[in-house]
Image (tube, helix red, strand yellow):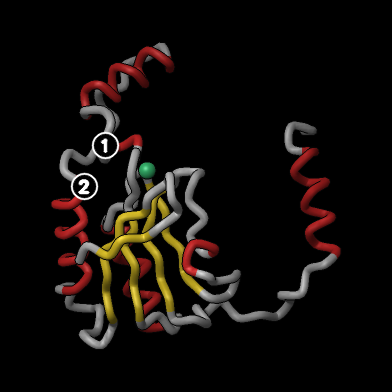
Amino acid sequence: MGDFDDLLAANREYAEDFDMAGFDGIAHAGIAIITCMDSRLAPLAMVGLRPGDAKIFRNPGGRVTEQALEALVLGAHLLNVDRILVVPHTRCAMTASTQQELRDQIGESAGVDADWQFFSVVEDQLAALEEDVQRVRTHPLIPKSVLVGGFMYDVDTGLLDQKF
Ligand SMILES: [Zn+2]
């Protein structure tokens, strides 16, 4: 106990002005964003949205994984989503190393073998993005009326560039 006191103190301040009590969990702007866990990305702010507007799913690399698809299917049918943005970014750590390099690096840091751990490394970001956008567009449970775009986010300019 006590390890999170700074954050809990900040949370009490946050709750003082909290005005989302009773607010529903749908995406009010109809947006879902799949993006990377990278701390340089602010998924809502980068497209002018606020809490309540969008469903956000993040993972290393911003990939359309099975679980991302699960989120999108739920979003499209139950949570008002009608536009989906898939957003990897420049200088992503998942593009900087191979699977084995990451396993070696993590294994050394952990002091135990990490060769069993899967890391979703990306060799060719554009090819991966095209494939990911296709996975969403062709998913049998995601309606054709849902618009899907693949964008590259530049961590040095803050700009999004639509690729697919
Ligand atoms: Zn990243």
Q: Quadrant of ligand 1?
A: top left
Residue type at mark 1: give it: Thr
Q: CA distance from mark 1 to mark 2?
A: 7 Å
| Residue 114 place in picture, x, y as percent | 31, 22
Number of residues whose C-alpha sits closer than 10 Å to that of mark 1, classed few (under 14), some (14–19) or many (20 or more): some
Residue 27 coordinates in the image, percent (x, y): 49, 78
In this rendering, position of residue 69 left or right of residue 110: left
Left or right: where 35 falls relative to 54? left
The reply, left or right, for residue 71 in relation to residue 26 is: left
Residue 121 vs 17, above or below: the answer is: above
Neighbor class of circle 2 (other Cα within 10 Å; few <14, some 14-19, many 20+) is some
**Disc 1 target residue:** 95
User: Which quarter of the rendered picture does the C terminus lie within?
Assistant: bottom left
Q: What is the secondary structure assignment of the residue under circle 2? A: helix
User: As shown in the figure, which amino acid type bears the numbered disc 2?
Assistant: Gln
Q: How many numbered tags mark residues here?
A: 2
Answer with mark 1 or mark 2, whichever residue precedes in sequence: 1
Q: Is mark 1 within 8 Å of ligand 1?
A: yes
Where is residue 110? Give x, y as percent: 43, 17
Q: Residue at x 41, y 71 (%)?
A: 32
- Residue sitting at 36 percent across and 54 percent down? 153
Image quadrant where residue 150 sits: bottom left
Q: Position of residue 64 (x, y in %)?
A: 27, 58
Which residue occupies 22% across, 69% down?
136
Query: What is the residue that sits farthest to the front in this orientation?
Result: 157
Quarter of the image with the N terminus is top right
Relative depth, front residue between 40 and 70: 40
- Proximity of marks 1 and 2: CB atoms separated by less than 8 Å: yes
Q: Residue at x 48, y 51 (%)?
A: 41
User: Which residue is identified by label 2?
Assistant: 125
Q: Is mark 2 within 8 Å of ligand 1?
A: no
Label 1, secondary structure: give it. helix
